Image (spheres, rainbow, N blue to C red):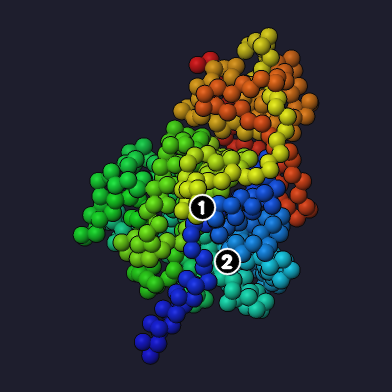
Amino acid sequence: MGWLSVVYGLVSVFILLVNSVSGIGANWGTQARNSLPPETVVNMLIDNGIQKVKLFDADYGALRALGKTRIEVMVGIPNELLASLAGSVKAAEKWVAKNVSEHITTNNVNIRYVAVGNEPFLTTYNGSFLRTTFPALANIQSALIKAGLSSQVKVTVPLNADVYSSSTSLPSGGDFRTDIHDYMIPIVKYLSDNNAPFTVNIYPFISLYIDSNFPVEYAFFDGNASPLNDGGTYYYNMFDANHDTLVWALQKNGYGNLPIIVGEIGWPTDGDQNANLEYARRFNQGFMNHISGGKGTPMRNGPVDAYLFSLIDEDAKSIQPGNFERHWGVFYFDGSPKYQLNLGTTNSGSLIPAKNVKYLEQKWCVMKPSASLDDPQVAPSVQYACENADCTALGYQTSCGGLDGRGNISYAFNSYYQMNNQRDTACQFPNVSKIVKSDPSVGTCKFWIGIQPYYAGADRKNGGLNSPLILVGYLILFLLTIL
């Protein structure tokens, strides 16, 4: 019967490949205060030839806009829902009925995957979701079977690359982390049994961010780094080495043929000294060139199924990991491209901006020229503005790192003003602010104009202005420093 197992495995992989469209996908996050209408974003996806999109929840507006477009959708289940879904099959059936079945049947949304959780085994979660992820996965699969959708919609669990490591610092030493090994194997087996893929998020930028000794060139795809020799197999970039560490981990545990989806890969453009436009363009274009030939990695030949992280900047994301978290998009918040990037999906060979974007008036909120830096109202005003807006472009070697003290304060004021739709009351910091009609942008530092507000339906989750910035405090002294 061994040959039947082999044939079955090959057929399963073939089915996954047939059911999945080719080309690059994109992560579409919606944690933003300045949001484009979903229809505008979907049209931008179509214009750029992006045929796959990954969502982090079941955002009603996004799913409705994706209807009848043939864009392949991975719909997400946030980690905070895992416990309820793990504890109740009925809860899972209700979730599938509302967020999968309804959109497929009433609006012809091309949902192909349900992502159960988002990096639930991340070490920073301290095991919070270890015991609920697999039961939630199984209950969602059971609900899909009951709904008659299990052949069309596959379950998966997007996992961070920290779920595996190498005992030898080489890909061939790869295995799942010992502390979560007994949690990983049931998930991997379940995915295999249900012809579902393993989804992994790979971030060379994070390796550079947390380790100042990380070889910068190894993060990119130019072949400038000294290669890693793994028993005669040479690795010239971190992506291939990281990806194949996973392949070895799967192989060692008996699942070497399990399909792999790269759920997130990208490079931020601001908020850190290594997060800039040039590095982001170099990385993302390098990655596109690297996978365009369909040769895969040394351990896994064939096309790489991947989703760029991310489509658009999200100015309401938590900055607990770092200020760069709000700057992963290949497009700015308004749908304008950040840099030249050829996805191989358009005739122009470059990104196509969002169309018919409606902006607010050409006016800005800045520090009043007559106000003094020593005014006691300045510090609390800046703190309030940054806590309720976005000051992550301010800092060492960031896009606005060259501003002087007054410039920093003006940037903070304007960010708050634009995010509050240019209401007059949003530029009334006591005796220290004023509205101007001349653009205060300087060099690489852009003082943005907001876009007209999009008011979503009741089912849409919006980031409110009261969302706290976890790391805002350290910025205040910098903002008040005259460079």
Work out whether residue 124 can be spotted. no
Q: CA distance from mark 1 to mark 2?
A: 26 Å
Q: Position of residue 47 (x, y in %)?
A: 59, 52
Q: Position of residue 421 (x, y in %)?
A: 74, 33
Name the residue beneath numbered marker 1.
Answer: 346
For residue 260, above or below residue 331? below
At label 1, counting other C-alpha atoms closer than 10 Å, the crowd grade (few under 14, some 14-19, many 20 or more) is: some
The type of residue carrying mark 1 is Thr
Dot 1 falls on a residue whose secondary structure is loop
Left or right relative to 216: residue 73: right
Q: Quadrant of residue 381?
A: top right
Q: Quadrant of the N terminus?
A: bottom left
Q: Position of residue 394 (x, y in %)?
A: 54, 28
Q: Position of residue 216 (x, y in %)?
A: 34, 40
Q: Quadrant of residue 92?
A: bottom right
For residue 467, above or below residue 411? below
Name the residue beneath numbered marker 2.
Answer: 113
Extreme-front residue of the structure: 347
Dot 2 falls on a residue whose secondary structure is strand
**Residue at position x 62%, y 45% from top?**
354
Earlier along the polypeptide chain: callout 1 or callout 2? 2
For residue 42, above or below residue 109? above
**Residue at position x 45%, y 41% from top?**
280
